[in-house]
Amino acid sequence: MSSGMKCENCGKGVMYGHNMSHAKNRTNRVFVPNLHPARVIIGGVMKRVRLCTKCLRMLKKTRVKKEAAPRTQPTIATA
């Protein structure tokens, strides 16, 4: 499977399930992650990655919290 629909940080990917009508008729559907492109500094190198919104929020919060301290984890670059 291609990594096109996976978060490059946490690995969240496609899930499969059913739509349920009021009459309980089940039809197949696909749950896709909410991915967004982001520029991230990893090891001093700027990389373009696709991250889910949960990971984007986590990285923004760690960036704000550690703004005064030296950065050791990946942080989101301002675009």
Image (cartoon, rainbow, N blue to C red):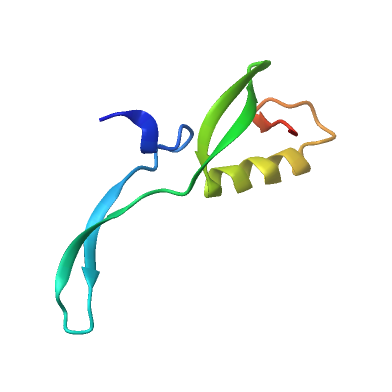
Q: Is residue 52 above or below residue 9?
A: below
Residue 8 in the image: x percent, y percent? 46, 32
Question: Looking at the image, which is closer to me, 42 or 22?
Answer: 22
Q: Is residue 8 above or below residue 59?
A: above
Question: Looking at the image, which is closer to me, 48 or 56?
Answer: 48
The quarter of the rendered structure image containing the N terminus is: top left
The residue under the point 39% across, 37% down is 6
- Left or right, 42 with respect to 12, comes to right
The residue under the point 24% across, 68% down is 19
Residue 38 in the image: x percent, y percent? 60, 34
Q: Tell me how many marks there are.
A: 0
Q: Quadrant of residue 7?
A: top left
The quarter of the rendered structure image containing the C terminus is: top right
Residue 62 in the image: x percent, y percent? 69, 41
One can see residue 74 in this view: no
Q: Is residue 30 above or below residue 4?
A: below
The residue under the point 41% across, 48% down is 33
Question: Looking at the image, which is closer to me, 6 or 28?
Answer: 28
- Left or right, 14 with respect to 23, comes to right
Question: Looking at the image, which is closer to me, 13 or 27?
Answer: 27
Please, which residue is most extreme toward the right here?
68
Please, which residue is most extreme toward the bottom here?
23
